[in-house]
Amino acid sequence: MPRYDDVEVGQQLPTETQTIDQAQLIRYAGASGDFNPLHWQEEFAAEVSPTGGIIAHGMLNAGLVSRAVTAWAGGPEKVKRLSTTFRAPCPVDSRVTIGGEVVEMDAEERTATLAVWVELPDGAKVVDRRRSRAVVQLD
Amino acid sequence: MYADDTADIVAPPTFAACFTVIRGGVDLFDDPELGAHRSLVHGSQEYECHRPLRPGDVLVCTPWITDLVNRGRNDFLTLQVDCVDADRGEPAVTSRGTFIFFPDAEES
């Protein structure tokens, strides 16, 4: 896990890329208890979805960010705050890129604040890096 | 996460979604005067983690509607859920979520 003295503004998390398929949305529905048919039923999604089709749970994308930050931080107990703003919808079968960058250090609290994001290949901001932050306790 | 070896397990930060987005959120639909409906998306979500969550924790979770504004055709509702230790009342996790309700297809 990173030590305060080894972290500086501008440091980036390892970038991850993955495809969010229908099976993952169904697994997330089961894990979270969020069975909104927007995430699995085409007929329902056609009526209410901002894209007209099935989209991923916002919290699934928050979870992808959370996993990346937790891995970097060295454990879930190191994450003090996680805020995510969901801007662009994430259609099923999207290829997403998950990333983060240290934007602020607090010497008194010994924490790092990271901008975090999930983006589509066209740059659409599923989790908007301008308004999404993680605060990590460092050693 | 497995239940048979729980000594050192700490919940991931977004695990709290299970009892702050879904359970806290479902309460919204129980109030007919509020008019919450299922044509909605999740706009943002924040977790303030006051302490690690572990298996066996018993939390009391209190949802609050802290803001409700109309912008254009949509309604933006902010839901805060304060989750505290059942024993001592000390804060464990605070959730703040924004939900965007589109015009209800059944009303329009």
Image (cartoon, coloured by chain):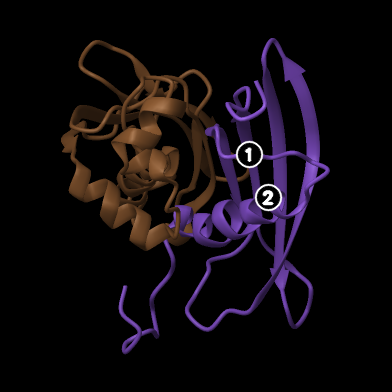
The first of marks 2 and 1 along the sequence is: 2
Question: Does residue A29 appear left or right of residue A98 in this picture?
Answer: right
| Crowd tier of the residue under label 2, counting other residues whose Cα lies within 10 Å: few below 14, some 14–19, many 20 or above | few
The residue pinned by badge 1 equals B37
Report how far apart the C-alphas of labels 2 and 1 lie in the structure.
7 Å
Please report the residue visible at 68 percent of the width from the left and 50 percent of the height from the top.
Answer: B29
Please report the residue visible at 46 percent of the width from the left and 59 percent of the height from the top.
Answer: B15
Is residue A61 visible in the rendered image? The answer is no
Q: What residue type is labelled 2?
A: Phe
Q: Where is residue B8 in the image (x, y as percent from the top left)?
A: 39, 79
The chain letter corresponding to purple is: B
Question: Does residue B31 appear left or right of residue B92 in this picture?
Answer: right
Quarter of the picture containing the C terminus of chain B is: top right
State the image quarter where residue A109 is shown. top right
Work out whether A72 lies above or below A75.
above
The foreground one among A36 and A20 is: A36
Q: Name the subunit of mark 1.
A: B
Q: In the figure, what tint was chain A given?
A: brown
Q: Position of residue B55 (x, y in %)?
A: 47, 79
Q: Where is residue A119 in the image (x, y as percent from the top left)?
A: 30, 22
The residue pinned by badge 2 equals B29
**Marks 2/1 same chain:** yes
Please report the residue visible at 57 percent of the width from the left and 62 percent of the height from the top.
Answer: B19
